[in-house]
Amino acid sequence: MDTTFVNMKRFSLSILLACLLGLLFAAPPAHADTPILAVSSDTASATPGSSVTLTLTFTNVHDTPVQFIYQSIQPTWTTSQSGALYSFTACGASATACDTGSTGGVVHQTAPVAVGASTTVTLTFTVAANSPCGERIDFYTYLYDEYQAGGANESGIYDVPGTAVACA
C-alpha cells in the first residue's frame, strides 16, 4: 500500500479527532456567564416619606423559551431587625401580576421570554413618614421560572447586589 495514502488517512483521522475533541471541550455559550437576575435601585439613599423604585431584570439563560416567571422580594434579616418602616406600593414595566402593600412584594413577569432575551419589572416601596431609619433597607429575592414547555424549572433565593438603600 502506498505510504502517502496511509499518511493522508492518518492525517485526516487526526484532524477529525482534533475537531471532535474541540467540540466536546468547547467553552459553553456566552450567555452562560449572564446572570439570570439583575437588580438596581433608582437611588442610593432614602428618607422617611420618600419612595424607592427597584428594577428587576430577568434574563433567560436557558436553551428554550421561559413560559412562567414568579418572583418575590423579601427584606434581609438585617432589614427586618432595623426598625425601618416601609411598604411596597406599586409595580410597573412588564409585570403581569403584582402583590404590594407589605414589607415584601410579589410579581409575575411577562412571558414567554425567548432564549437570551430579558424582561424587566419595577417594584416601588415607600418609607413611612414615621420610620426611624438609621440603617439600610435591603432585600433578597426568590425566583422561580419554567422552561422546556413547562417540563423543567429553576428556583432559588438570590442575594443580588443593587437593592441596598441607606435610610437616614
Image: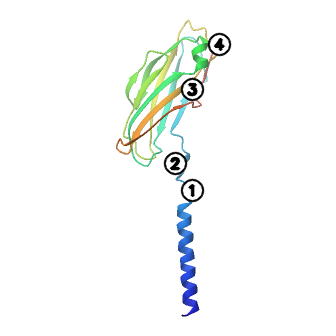
Residue located beneath label 3 in the image: 163
Q: In this view, which residue lies farthest toward the front?
A: 1
Q: Secondary structure at mark 4?
A: loop
Disc number for residue 157: none
Q: What is the CA distance from the residue labelled 1 to the residue labelled 2?
A: 11 Å
Q: Quadrant of the N terminus?
A: bottom right
Q: Which mark is residue 31?
A: 2
Q: State the separation of the CA atoms marked 1 and 3.
A: 32 Å
On screen, residue 152 versus residue 1, left or right, reads left
Question: Which comes before the other along the chain, label 4 or label 1?
Answer: 1
**Labels 2 and 3: the sequence-earlier one:** 2
Position in image of residue 129 (x %, y %): 54, 8
Q: Which mark is residue 134?
A: 4
> Which residue corresponds to the image point at 53% horizontal and 10% vertical from the top-left?
128
Q: What's under tag 3, amino acid-wise?
A: Thr
Horizontal and vertical percent for residue 158? 54, 32
Q: Residues within 10 Å of mark 4 (few under 14, many from 20)?
A: few
Real-space CA distance between mark 4 and mark 1, rounded to the nearest whole angstrom: 47 Å
- Which amino acid, mark 2? His
Label at residue 27:
1
Residue 62 vs residue 77: left or right? left
Kindly identify the amino acid type of the residue bearing the numbered disc 1. Ala
User: Which type of secondary structure does the marked residue at label 1 adopt?
Assistant: loop
